Amino acid sequence: MAEKAKVEDKAVKVDKKSDKDNNSSSKGEDKSNKSRKPTAEDLAKGQRDISVAEFFEKNRHLLGFDNPRKSLLTTIKEAVDNALDACEEAKILPEISVEIIEMAENRYRIIVEDNGPGIVKEQIPKIFAKLLYGSKFHRLRQSRGQQGIGISAAVMFAQLTTGRPTKITSKTDPNKSAHYMELHLNTQNNSPEIMVDEVKPWDNKEHGTRIEMDLEAAYIKGDQSVDQYLKETAIVNPHTTIIYTNPKAEQFIYARATDNLPKEPLEIKPHPYGLELGILMKMLKNTEARTVNSFLLNDLSRIGPGTAKEILEMALIDPKKKPEEMGMQDAEKLIKAMKEAKIMAPTTDCLSPIGEELLEKSLKKEINAEFYVAVTRPIFVYRGNPFQVEVGLAYGGNQSKEDQVQILRFANRVPLLYQQGACATTKAITSTNWKAYGLQQSNGGIPTGPLTILVHMCSVWVPFTSESKEALAHYPDIIKELKLAVQEAGRKLQLYVAKKHRVQNQLERANLFERYMPEVADALSRLTGENKQLLLDQLKAMTNKDEIRQQIFEMEALKGEADAEGKTDRNGSESDDVEDSEEKHQEDDE
Ligand SMILES: Nc1ncnc2c1ncn2[C@@H]1O[C@H](COP(=O)(O)OP(=O)(O)O)[C@@H](O)[C@H]1O
Ligand SMILES: [Mg+2]
């Protein structure tokens, strides 16, 4: 008996690892539950669906709710990003008010209100109290949200931490009343529970949405704060007005700098370059096209009749073949031929970058520097998705010279405040040689110097490293483009820095010369017998000091409009000594 128990013990132990040993005990003389090995049927009893809400309830860090400070930011970010998306889609100049009220220790009420198109009554519960529900996932169009998991995740988090329902007011028509709802999210089946459903007047509002929720959070100022997020949002969304009241009852008004809405990005079909086999198979299965030829023309972008013919000839596929008859091998041949065919880059109207001019203008408004430059790269494609990269630099001014440069990262006009180290933009910056542009940099690190680097990537589908949308994934095509943009801007910065050195040196030499001029004139006058004053005047004319001064003046006129109150001075350093920093860079150059 003792021996048998031993054998069974062993069997139970190896149960998970090996099936071979199973036979010895599954004969099952001993039927007691204690020692019986579980069968597949037993295991089946424990196997069941996991609701997506239950999954994210346990893994809330994946959605950006891993600590109280970040939770506050994520909640506001989801609401503001949605408000901006909705306004732009409805062609309304956004006016957004954000209010954070401290209710108790670690408990805050946030109220976000927009002047967007509003939400029809039937959709309100699903939008706010069902995860993975939205209008942006199934399309290829540049927008801030894409996963349909943003605002409902915030609703779930508020409910988990305070038990309170989220309160939504929405009005879609100036002549109609607003709908008011209080919602809970049932995490077991990921579905909304409507606690209150009323019609309400909302007199001073033509249309828009207002969200109110209570959550456990922490309000802390600084680099990763709500304050910083809203400030950066204003930089890259100059068409937006944001009125922000923080828990200290301080109000910030970011007034819009332009009345022009950004160029509307058009929805597009996938581009053939980089299209994956599985996606192509799915598309062939679901298409309404009757032939492969018309599938290529209608369901993918940038393929005209000539290109379609070329692709199908290369792939040896009959143009009249029905898409549903296309097998795996056909699809593979099609992918190969599409890779080899010359297909035009995506049209520029699917993306809406900020643009060099506006980017420079925004930097000038917010960052106290002396030189600004912006670069917008042409459109490229990764995995069939068009994307575009922009880089802006603001150099000098009252930015600290001893600290690492400030990096401002954006994706589809949304500031990214966390996970800087994991972001493709950081990789592109650290793998660029900044010494060549007059900055200090230790091996493969973030450069040091009085510089702000703004990087923006826009795409019809931004590849984030996680659902919390904090960092860009390291796709080689994207990193390459980011690097090219950084380098292009860097070279322009280098030209400025070098010119500044040159002019500064000239001035120094002129000053030196000027100091000895009276003695030189005196000596010359004695040697030649010329009038001393005349000689002095001629020598003065030779130094061209006015011309040099004019050059310096012109360079300084490039300065931004930001006031010098240390707006971007992260380190409280008040130093404004440009010459100093130039000298330091000169040393680097040499
Ligand atoms: N303030 C708003 N005004 C109008 N529509 C909104 C607003 N907020 C959210 N929506 C709609 O709700 C959907 C779901 O939002 P969300 O859960 O944040 O996912 P996503 O933004 O990724 O699509 C959006 O796709 C949009 O259609
Ligand atoms: Mg969203």
Image: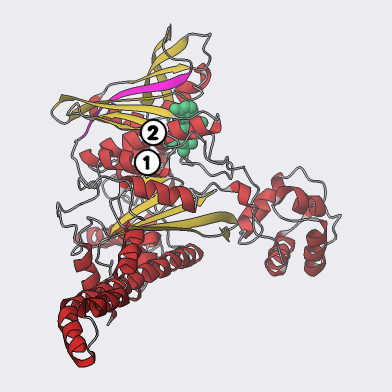
Residue 568: percent from the left, percent from the top?
A: 24, 49
Report the residue marked by disc 1.
233
Report the residue marked by disc 2.
80
Residue closer to the observer: 489 or 186: 489
| Foreground: disc 1 or disc 2 | 1
Count neighbours of disc 1 (C-alpha within 10 A) and say few if under 14, some if 14 to 19, many if 20 or more. many
Residue 563: percent from the left, percent from the top?
A: 25, 45
Query: Does the residue tagged 2 have its C-beta within 8 Å of any atom of ligand 1?
Result: no
Residue closer to the observer: 520 or 299: 520
Residue 330 vs 224, above or below: the answer is below
Q: Which amino acid type is shown beneath numbered disc 2?
A: Val
Q: Which amino acid type is shown beneath numbered disc 1?
A: Thr
Query: What's the distance in space between the residues labelled 1 and 2, CA to CA?
Result: 9 Å
- On screen, residue 88 versus residue 252, left or right, reads right
Is residue 225 part of the magenta span, yes or no? no
Residue stretch in magenta = 207-217
Residue 393: percent from the left, percent from the top?
A: 37, 58
Count neighbours of disc 2 (C-alpha within 10 A) and say few if under 14, some if 14 to 19, many if 20 or more. many
